[in-house]
Image: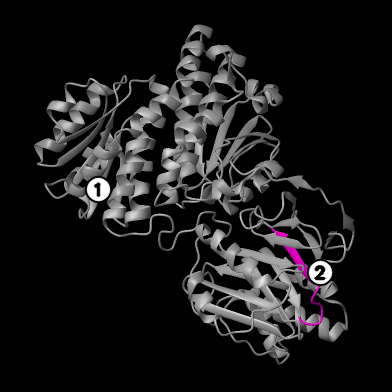
């Protein structure tokens, strides 16, 4: 959520900031703004509600010169989306400008105190409280901006990533973070900062990931300096970005979402490379090997996640219980952190997050650590907070996912959870080696199976025309296919704004069956697994009530083909791998329905790619 970009150097900052804001649009936002120090020493702040293009139009006749600036895309928390509430925010003396991601939880107490001391506010945001507090401290303590920022952050309760500039220091940005991501790019006589690496990769490969409670002094004339809130200097750990500009472009596709759907044969190959070896005979997951004793002796595994990652985690539960015979619970991280969970040192907590920055999941990790549990992370973004704050873990290696609705990250998470389950099963001896080898051999074929499934693209595009104007959808599945039903319903909701619900197929009789009629399409995920005959019965129950059925079935299916209205055939794979294959047609169906409705599939309304606030 939200996005920060900053630049200091010899180039025109505005051009870099605007390009960076466009790179961050995928994160979700409702307004945008920039602050620039001009060569004449004027601090110019320009803001506009709506898209970054609105900001560009507003700035056409404005002074956008200067080699230092900060910029922001805002996703509203405190105060409605508007020009007034957009970032950056001025201090009352208009000498300081600040952008902020996160939430200041004690902003009301701070604001009341500042008002009592004569401060006047221009917005409804919690962020303006922080910039006014910094100004107040600097003025009354006669201190530097760095010292004022440190003191202000000691008084703040909440999450933040901030960047601050002042008009009298046109060579320095002060930045800081706590529970919200911030990365600094190091160039030759210039420096960059951003919420993630996407705005930086075009200019430098050398980056520093700011840690919690660190403050960065970012200057074009001096080396990067990091200090903590106690004014103790901390080490600067420079990393090399493994990201390319080509990964951030659409590559000829009309939307990032469609590109990412079609990338899945390649991303899944990247995900299994080096992990499924010796022609499928061996599974090597280094994070599991590093945690061998913890998994061998675990009395329970708890998986915490949000959104699509939670659906992948449900599949992980089936996989680990089936293969490893370890009890598994799956919790929404947002509920887990407030549920007073009972944990001890024999529990393993697996945290799953595409971005590695999900606020609720990070809070759940901290809670698990405090209780003595071993914490294992699954993430996509190298250097993000979850890998840095877990005991061990595995990257899914699917590359940057720009579309807000997750596709390739979902299949990557499911694949990694499959490999983890197989690795633990081999350690514990809970599955015969020959069975593991058979699955390993099939995993090596999964990229080709996905490529084969993507050849259904034109069939699904035609099918989408029939259902574009439905008002409701029901998605049903059993066993491994139940989480797929949840994920299919979520994809449709996210990008087409059609109400959809996923259910275990047997639960249909406990309520949802009342909704079924000729106007309510039902998508049934029905691969040829051990529950096939049960799902056939569910299809018949829907048809008996004149419901329209779209069935995802295994190629060669005869029984459901004779009952359902529309059938999509997918390759025949082992039961544990069906979720990866059956999810592909549901991604395409939701994409085309949304496109038919004229929706922005890459940036659906009200949604953000990475939820870094509560």
Screen quadrant of the N terminus: bottom right
Q: Is residue 515 above or below residue 189?
A: above
Screen quadrant of the C terminus: bottom right
Q: Residue at x 34, y 30 (%)?
A: 453
Residue 2 point in image, percent of width and height: 57, 64
Q: Quadrant of residue 601?
A: bottom left
Q: Residues within 10 Å of mark 1 (few under 14, many from 20)?
A: many
Q: Residue at x 76, y 86 (%)?
A: 40
Q: Which residue is mark 1?
A: 473
Tell me how far mark 1 sits from mark 2, CA to CA: 52 Å
In the image, residue 79 lies in the stretch drawn in magenta = no
Q: Which residue is mark 2?
A: 150
| Residue 479 seen in the current view | no
Q: Left or right? Give the position of 341 relative to 7.
A: left
Q: Residue at x 39, y 25 (%)?
A: 449
Mark 1: secondary structure: strand
Residue 66 point in image, percent of width and height: 72, 77
Disc number placed over residue 10 in the picture, else none:
none
In the image, residue 169 lies in the stretch drawn in magenta = yes
Q: Nearer the viewer, residue 69 or 134?
A: 69
Q: Quadrant of residue 34?
A: bottom right
| Residue 202 seen in the current view | yes
Q: Left or right? Give the position of 241 relative to 349.
A: right
Q: Left or right? Give the position of 234 relative to 265.
A: right
Q: Quadrant of residue 545?
A: top left
């Amino acid at each position: 959520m939200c996005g920060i970009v900053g630049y200091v150097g010899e180039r025109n900052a505005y051009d870099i900031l605007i390009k960076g804001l466009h790179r961050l649009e995928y994160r979700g936002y409702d307004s945008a703004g920039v602050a620039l120090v001009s060569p004449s020493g004027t601090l110019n702040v320009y803001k506009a509600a709506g898209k970054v293009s609105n900001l560009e139009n507003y700035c056409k006749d404005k002074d956008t010169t200067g080699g230092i600036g900060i910029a922001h895309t805002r996703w509203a928390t405190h105060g409605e989306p508007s020009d007034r509430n957009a970032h950056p925010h001025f201090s009352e003396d208009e000498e300081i400008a600040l952008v902020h991601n996160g939430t200041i939880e004690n902003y009301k107490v701070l604001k009341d105190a500042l008002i009592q001391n004569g401060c006047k506010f221009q917005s409804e945001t919690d962020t303006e409280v922080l910039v006014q507090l910094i100004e107040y401290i600097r003025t009354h303590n006669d201190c530097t901006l760095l010292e004022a920022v440190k003191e202000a952050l000691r008084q703040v309760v909440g999450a933040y990533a901030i960047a601050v500039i002042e008009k009298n220091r046109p060579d320095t940005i002060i930045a800081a973070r706590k529970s919200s991501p911030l990365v600094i790019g190091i160039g030759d006589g210039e420096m960059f900062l951003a919420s993630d690496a996407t705005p930086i990769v075009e200019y430098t490969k050398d980056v520093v990931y700011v840690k919690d409670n660190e403050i960065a002094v970012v200057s074009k004339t001096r080396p990067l300096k990091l200090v903590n809130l106690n004014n103790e200097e901390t080490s600067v750990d420079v990393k090399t970005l493994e990201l390319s500009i080509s990964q951030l472009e659409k590559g000829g596709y009309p939307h990032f979402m469609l590109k990412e759907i079609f990338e899945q044969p390649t991303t899944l190959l990247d995900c299994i490379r080096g992990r499924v070896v010796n022609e499928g005979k061996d599974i090597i997951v280094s994070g599991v090997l590093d945690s061998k004793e913890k998994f061998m002796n675990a009395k329970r595994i708890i998986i915490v996640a949000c959104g699509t990652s939670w659906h992948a985690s449900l599949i992980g539960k089936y996989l680990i219980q089936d293969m490893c015979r370890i009890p598994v619970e799956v919790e929404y991280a947002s509920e887990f952190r407030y549920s007073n969970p009972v944990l001890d040192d024999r529990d393993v907590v697996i945290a799953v997050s595409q971005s590695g920055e999900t606020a609720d999941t990070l809070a759940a990790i901290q809670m698990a650590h405090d209780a003595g549990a071993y914490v294992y992370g699954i993430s996509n973004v190298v250097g993000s907070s979850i890998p840095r704050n877990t005991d061990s873990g595995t990257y899914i290696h699917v590359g940057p996912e720009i579309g807000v609705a997750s596709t390739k990250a979902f299949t990557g998470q499911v694949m990694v959870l499959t490999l983890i389950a197989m690795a633990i099963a081999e350690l514990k001896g809970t599955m015969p080696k020959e069975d593991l080898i058979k699955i390993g051999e099939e995993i090596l074929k999964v990229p080709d199976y996905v490529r084969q499934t993507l050849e259904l693209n034109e069939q699904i595009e035609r099918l989408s025309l029939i259902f574009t104007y439905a008002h409701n959808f029901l998605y049903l599945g059993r066993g491994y296919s139940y989480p797929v039903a949840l994920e299919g319903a979520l994809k449709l909701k996210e990008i087409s704004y059609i109400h959809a619900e996923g259910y275990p197929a047997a639960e249909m009789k406990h309520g949802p069956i009342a909704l079924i009629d000729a106007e309510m399409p039902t998508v049934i995920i029905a691969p040829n697994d051990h529950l096939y005959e049960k799902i056939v019965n569910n299809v018949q129950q829907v048809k008996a009530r004149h419901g329209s059925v779209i069935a995802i079935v295994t190629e060669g299916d005869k029984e459901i083909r004779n009952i359902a209205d529309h059938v999509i055939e997918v390759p025949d794979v082992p039961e544990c791998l069906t979720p990866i294959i059956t999810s592909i047609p549901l991604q395409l169906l939701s994409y085309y329905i949304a496109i038919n409705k004229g929706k922005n599939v890459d940036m659906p309304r009200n949604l953000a790619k990475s939820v870094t606030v509560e």
